[in-house]
Each structure stands twice: as structure tokens, then as C-alpha cells.
Amino acid sequence: MSEHDTHSTCEHAHEHESGETGLRASRRDVIKGVIASGVAVSSTGYVVAGRPGEAVAQTAGAVERLVTVNVNGADRRVDVLPQETLVQTLRYKLGLTGTKIGCDHSECGNCTVMVDGIATYSCTTLTQRVRGKKVVTIEGIAGPNGQLHKVQKAMLEEIAPQCGFCTPGQVVTAVALLNENPKPTEDEVLVAMSGNMCRCGAYNHYLNAVMRASKEA
């Protein structure tokens, strides 16, 4: 092999190696660029505007996380995740632990609250959906000075609570019923209360309590 051929071969090998290095660098640059652009996009989801700490959604499909929820007559400002359920917000962020988590699938009724006067399962209701609505939990049933609601008094008189775990949901459901239908029949009470399960089987006691409360002024 001549000196010229040897030089040409070495030069070609150098060019080939440089090409591979350039290709590898190019791939790294692309990956870095994708990661950087992803971080940039995600970081623009919320910006601070208006009042300090107030998050405003900027990207398509995003939701405002810092929302106002009216609970038991008071507006509560709370940081809410997009898929956060109302029962999670009530218990873990607002400290209203009277609302219980049972099945977590809208079957037992332990998590029942009132939303605009309607008995609602809070375990499958997104907190984002109750903005602008009035939520009442078991803590909001008694009077301002702590006097028991007639449903609460009737349930005590009829010895309805046994273990008591389902009682908050039973009370809220009964109050919602009597607010809408002050003088229900027993069949109407059974239908309205059918979404509340009692592990102790005290259904007749709860029925009698609602009927007793319906007879009070």
C-alpha cells in the first residue's frame, strides 16, 4: 500500500469516527431538548397572579387548584388537586372528620353530605365540582349554639346509633329528606334511606327516628 493510500484510509476512518461522534451528540441534544421542553411546558401550568398565592390555570385542560368551597355556611379557601374527592378535602384538609369513608365507591352512604340541599356521596364527588355550591356536613347539622337538630334528638331517643360509624351519613340523609318532604310516609323514608348501610342492622331504629322527627314541629 502506498503512502498516499495509507493517508487516505486513515483520513476516511477519522471522518467516519467523527460522524458517529456527531450522531451520538445529536441524539443526546435531542433527548436533552425533549426533557427541557417538557419541564418548560409543565412549569407553565400555573402562574401567580392577582392575590398572593392565587394559582391561575394557563395550559389547555388545566384547572385552578386554589379554590373556594362553601362548607357549613363558611367559605373555605383550599388547595385542591384535579382528581381530589370531596370527602378527602373535608377530612384531610378541612379537618371535618365527621364525614366517614366506608366503601369509597358510593355504596355504603357513610360519606353522605348535602350539596345544595341534596344528599350526595362525597367519596365520588370531585371537590372541583362543588365550587359555587353549598356543602353541609354532619358538623353543620346542629344549631349555632350546639343544640341538636330534631333528627339527631330523635335518633338518640330511638337508640338508632349502635357502633355509630354510619350515623353521620344517616343523619345527613334524613335531614335532606325532611327538608324536602317534611311529612314522609314510612315507604318514602325507606326509599330515601336505602342508600345508607348499617353494619349493626339497626334499620328499624333509624326508620323510627326519622318518623319521630317528622312529627315534631
Image (cartoon, rainbow, N blue to C red):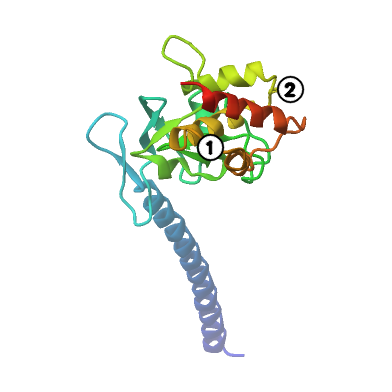
Q: Is residue 112 left or right of residue 62?
A: right
Q: Residue at x 61, y 38 (%)?
A: 186
Mark 2 vs mark 1: in front: 1
Residue marked by disc 2: 162
| Dot 1 alpha-carbon crowd within 10 angstroms: few under 14, some 14 to 19, many 20 or more | some
Residue drawn at (51%, 44%), measured in percent from left and top? 125
91 or 210, which is in the foreground? Answer: 210
* 104 in relation to 171, above or below: below
Residue 114 appears anywhere in the view: yes
Occupied quadrant, residue 194: top right
- Mark number for residue 184? 1
Looking at the image, which residue is at 52% across and 67% down? Answer: 24
The quarter of the image holding the N terminus is: bottom right
Q: Position of residue 201 (x, y in %)?
A: 77, 33
Near-viewer residue (188 or 170): 188
| Amino acid at the residue labelled 2 | Gln
Mark earlier in primary sequence (2, 1): 2
